[in-house]
Amino acid sequence: MSASLYRYADGQLPNSLALAYAFGGYAAGFTLLFADHWALNAIGTLLLGHAMIVAAYLIHEFAHGTIFAKPAHNTWAGEACSWLCGSCYAGFQDLRRKHMRHHVDRADVITFDTKAFLARSPRWVRGLVLAAEWAYVPAIELVMHYYVILLPFITDNPRHRANRRRVALTLLVRGVLFGLVAAVSLKALLLYFVAWTLMIIVLRFTDAYQHTYDAFAVLEDGGKIPADKNRDRTYEQMNTYSNVVSVRWPALDLLLLNFAYHNAHHEKPVAPWYRLRKLHHELYGEGYNQVLPMHLLFKSFHQHRLRRVVDDHYGEVAPEGKDRADGFYGAVGVSFLTAV
């Protein structure tokens, strides 16, 4: 590929490698799901799941326009990666629009309030969702993905109703493809859903601990959030956390395309993924208090897996100590893969 294809000249190699891994890893991993040996099936499932994770974080990069020089190319690539991730029922621009509100408003702005949904649902629905979440099944994210599919058919909003044809065609195409896979190997179809669920779990864990923003449910895309506090850049940084995979081995953050360097990303949203580690150290140096290595978050993820589903508050992070993240419940249902 020509360097002029990319927005930044130094992006030719890292972006080409990331794109090749996302699409090539998806193809190779999917192929291994049909193998006769369980070890190849396991490798294929993990490879497929990780390729989808990389594709998801590439969608985030496309949304910020950091990969390609032309906006149209970012849109096309974002749509393609959305098909890899199973988030293709909503258009890429819808995904982008929702994510940009997160940056502009410095809040988690959603149009579907899962906590209110659970509160008004029949007891058996609430119990089923909580039981699934207790068993580490990402039920809330599944509800939101299915809501994206249902929304055009249950709303009076003309913009959402206009997506009916897209959703119907996408359901048809994916249904036919899943049917073909099932006809060849039910095992492969099951392993595909395992790989997709792994992607959702990794994304939701990372998303859960990057902000202690206020969350607002607004019924319309242009709905305003309350002007109840000064949400300036200081507020943004103090309520953003860099949940790095490892401080000791920073190369591991490449597994998530450096998405965990979230303070640097919010300080400079147009900085591409491959520059974020360097930018983080230029901005904050060593020992930045907003860094929360992931090993500090596993206990909270386990202990608060039900509380974060029903509590309106994300919890708090203590100023210091190895247990300073124990009171950080985390967010749920804030994925950039859902356009609601």
Image (tube, rainbow, N blue to C red):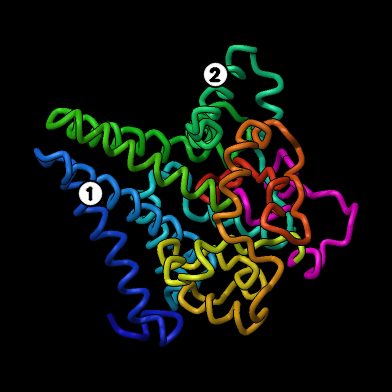
The reply to whether residue 164 is visible in this rendering is yes
Q: Which residue is more in the foreground, 254 or 66?
A: 254
Indicate the quadrant where residue 172 lies. top left
334 over 318 or under it: above or below: above
Which quarter of the rendering shows the C terminus? Answer: top right
Which quarter of the rendering shows the N terminus? Answer: bottom left
In the image, farthest residue toward the front: 322
Identity of the residue drawn at 71% across and 62% down: 104
198 over 142 or under it: above or below: below
Residue type at mark 2? Leu
Instruction: Residue 218: give x, y in percent of width and height.
Output: 73, 41
Q: Earlier in the sequence, mark 1 or mark 2?
A: 1
Residue type at mark 1? Ile
Task: Report whether 198 appears left or right of 244.
Answer: left
Q: Which residue is more in the foreground, 185 or 284?
A: 284
Q: For the residue labelled by badge 2, is the local secondary structure a helix, a strand or a loop?
A: helix
Indicate the quadrant where residue 180 lies. top left
Task: Report whether 160 appears left or right of 287.
Answer: left
The reply to whether residue 94 is visible in this rendering is no
Identity of the residue drawn at 38% across and 62% down: 77
Q: How many marks?
A: 2
Q: Which residue is more in the foreground, 93 or 299?
A: 299
Residue tagged 1? 43
Task: Report the Cα–Cα distance between label 1 and label 2.
Answer: 31 Å
Instruction: Residue 285: give x, y in percent of width and height.
Output: 65, 81
Residue tagged 2? 128
Segment tinted magenta in the rendering: 208-237
234 over 193 or under it: above or below: below
